[in-house]
Amino acid sequence: MDRTLLPALAAFAEVAREGGFTAAARRLNVSPSALSQTLRALEERLAVRLLNRSTRSVSATEEGRRLLARIEPALADIAQAVVGLDDDRKQPTGEIRISTSRLAARYFIEPHLGEFRRRYPKVRLELVIDDGLGDIIREGCDAGVRLREAVPDSMIAVPISPPMRLVVVGSPAYLAGRPAPRTPADLEAHDRVAFRPGVQGPMLKWEFTDPDTGREFTAEPPAAFVTNADETMLSAGLQGLGLVQHMDCMVREHVAAGALIRVLDDWCPPFDGFDLYLPSREQMAPKLRALVDFLVEKRRALD
């Protein structure tokens, strides 16, 4: 292979990923016109058209897509090798913005903030609390933390929590007044403390899995109280307003103290927990590698 083609191939990959010359030129610190000339020269050298161009957009041709799929792993390996050399001589430093749900922050990040700061005093963390799905690229964040089922396929994802479980609980006073449900069908005779995300969205349905067939389904018991705040929902359940479905980590201490009683456990199997995720095409800077390794270490301590 003619190694003099490497800079032009790397430039082509950047243009194809960004979908245009302007953004790619900014990342490469060159002018759009110079970048366009580089790509035209590459197409002439290879005798194949790699990009379709219009006044508004740029996209890879079929040949360009095939080439991109072949060269991206090699370009990533080269970039990673350079980052690895840099890691050997640099202490992690800089800012890391993390988009995370409130629950994930509370249980898997906040308890370790002091230790992380002591280990990496030159790294500043910023937590952006967002209980929605979050778009870390649009929000300008370096990483995100969400349940694995909500992590986009295009991201690099690393588990940072054990498997999770949605559980149904009620206070002893509430359950003393009526028989505990044995199946989700019995919930029609019970009151529910319901959760409504946002201000005007629908109330969340309760999720169950049939222990005999594995069939997943939802239920909507009668709502006696509605809120959009986790802590308020839990407080209402503790005061006996109705049954609550919540993550097991949120109710574990109350169950251990006898303030809440779990029901329908056979219908609430575990599922994948929280992942830390990063853009798949970005190379991992020392500060991000430090964060990933740290949270993985804390995850292993929970096993």
Image (cartoon, helix red, strand yellow):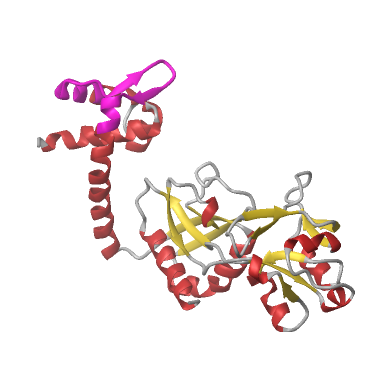
- Please tell me which residue lies in front, 247 or 293: 247
The image quarter containing residue 170 is: bottom right
- Please tell me which residue lies in front, 216 or 67: 216
Which residue is outermost to the bottom?
257
- Residue 83 locus on image (x, y percent): 28, 55
Q: Who's the residue at 51% across and 67% down the image?
A: 161
- Residue 81 locus on image (x, y percent): 23, 54
Q: Who's the residue at 25% across and 26% down the image?
A: 63
User: Do we see residue 16 in this rendering?
Assistant: yes
Horizontal arrangement in the rendering, residue 55 relative to residue 194 (left or right): left
Q: Who's the residue at 54% across and 70% down the image?
A: 113
Which residue is outermost to the left?
1
The image quarter containing residue 5 is: top left
Q: Who's the residue at 18% across and 37% down the image?
A: 6
Which residue is outermost to the top?
55
Q: Is residue 67 above or below residue 301?
A: above
Q: Give yes or no for residue 60 being in the magenta stretch.
A: yes
- Residue 168 locus on image (x, y percent): 72, 67
Q: Is residue 265 above or below residue 37?
A: below
Q: Give yes or no for residue 1 being in the magenta stretch.
A: no
User: Do we see residue 145 in this rendering?
Assistant: no
Q: Quadrant of the N terminus?
A: top left
The image quarter containing residue 182 is: bottom right
Which residue is outermost to the front?
212
Horizontal arrangement in the rendering, residue 65 relative to residue 1 (left or right): right
Q: How many marks?
A: 0
Q: Is residue 229 above or below residue 32?
A: below
- Residue 103 locus on image (x, y percent): 63, 63
What is the span of residues highlighted in magenta in the rendered image? Answer: 39-66
